[in-house]
Amino acid sequence: MARSLRGRRTGVIGMLSDSIATSPFAGRMVLGAMEAARARGHQILLMESRSDPGAEAEAIAELRARRVDGFVYAAMELTMTDVPAGLDPGRTVLANCLPLAENTYAAVMTDERGGGPSAVDVLLAAGHEDVALVGGPEGNIAADNRTRGFTDGLRAAGLSARQGWVRRIGWQIDEGYAAALNLLDATERPTAVVCANGRVATGVLLAAARLGIA
């Protein structure tokens, strides 16, 4: 405490998110933050709002009262966010979300669009040209960018997805299963499928097994 008063630093970074405790993805995000902070002589103080504005305001007030050196404001689903009051843009980084007001906060996020061509390239290298996409919901930033990346990858190879081979669904196993049953039971079917996430891929594999497709 004496060192923090003298140096005006506490060695603590506050991390606030909407649903830290309920997502496996969140656990990896928190672990990464802790490892990076510890490597630089800091610790992470973790708080969760459960998307409750009142709880969020209380958490920010508590972190400020503890005089943390900086803030990480994290979201479990890539989204545009109205950053709450009390988070200084000069000491706050957004993780997996973007500010509604452009150029106000630093933000770190996944290269969703760049992942699409990478997935397509793997399949093209394996000899596939009839490639479909079972993607996430329309209007979702991550899903939209992954779909654009998928299209980019095919276009770069001089290819395009056939009509009806881009299926925009949700993120869950049952949604991947339903979409793949229809997609793979057609007379002309793809030989490879890019999936929105692991859960959708599980649904696609289950549908292929149901149809007797190796």
Image (cartoon, rainbow, N blue to C red):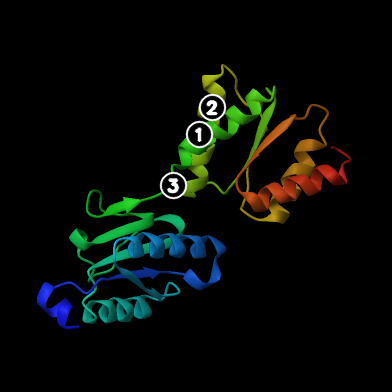
Q: Amino acid at mark 2?
A: Gly
Residue 75 higher or lower than 214, as above or below? below
Image coordinates for residue 77, horizontal then vertical, percent? 47, 58
Q: Are marks 2 and 1 in contact (CB under 8 Å)?
A: yes
Q: Earlier in the sequence, mark 2 or mark 3?
A: 3
Q: Would you name the residue on which mark 2 appears? A: 153
Mark 3 burial class by Cα count in 10 Å: few <14, some 14-19, many 20+? few
Residue in the foreground of this view, choosing between 154 and 10: 10
Mark nearer the viewer, 2 or 3: 3
Cβ atoms at labels 2 and 3 below 8 Å apart: no
Instruction: Kindly indicate the quadrant of the structure image that contains residue 96.
Output: bottom left
- Residue 149 disc label: 1
Give the amino acid type for the residue marked by disc 1 in the picture: Gly
Vertical position of residue 47 compared to residue 196: above or below: below
Residue at the spot x=52%, y=40% of the render? 146
At x 51%, y 38%, the residue is: 115
Residue in the image at 31% along x and 81% along y: 58
For marks 2 and 3, give the CA distance: 17 Å
Residue type, label 3 = Thr
- Mark 3 lies on a secondary structure that is loop
Q: Which mark is residue 94?
A: none
* Position of the N terminus by quadrant: bottom left
Picture quadrant where residue 188 is located: top right
Q: Quadrant of residue 83?
A: bottom left
Q: Earlier in the sequence, mark 3 or mark 1?
A: 3
Q: Which residue is mark 3?
A: 110
Few, some or many residues within 10 Å of mark 1 (<14, 14–19, 20+): many
Image location of residue 59, percent across then percent down: 33, 78
> Depth-wise, is mark 3 or mark 1 nearer the camera?
3
Q: Residues within 10 Å of mark 2 (few under 14, many from 20)?
A: many
Query: What is the residue that sits farthest to the left in this orientation?
Result: 6
Q: Residue furthest top?
A: 158
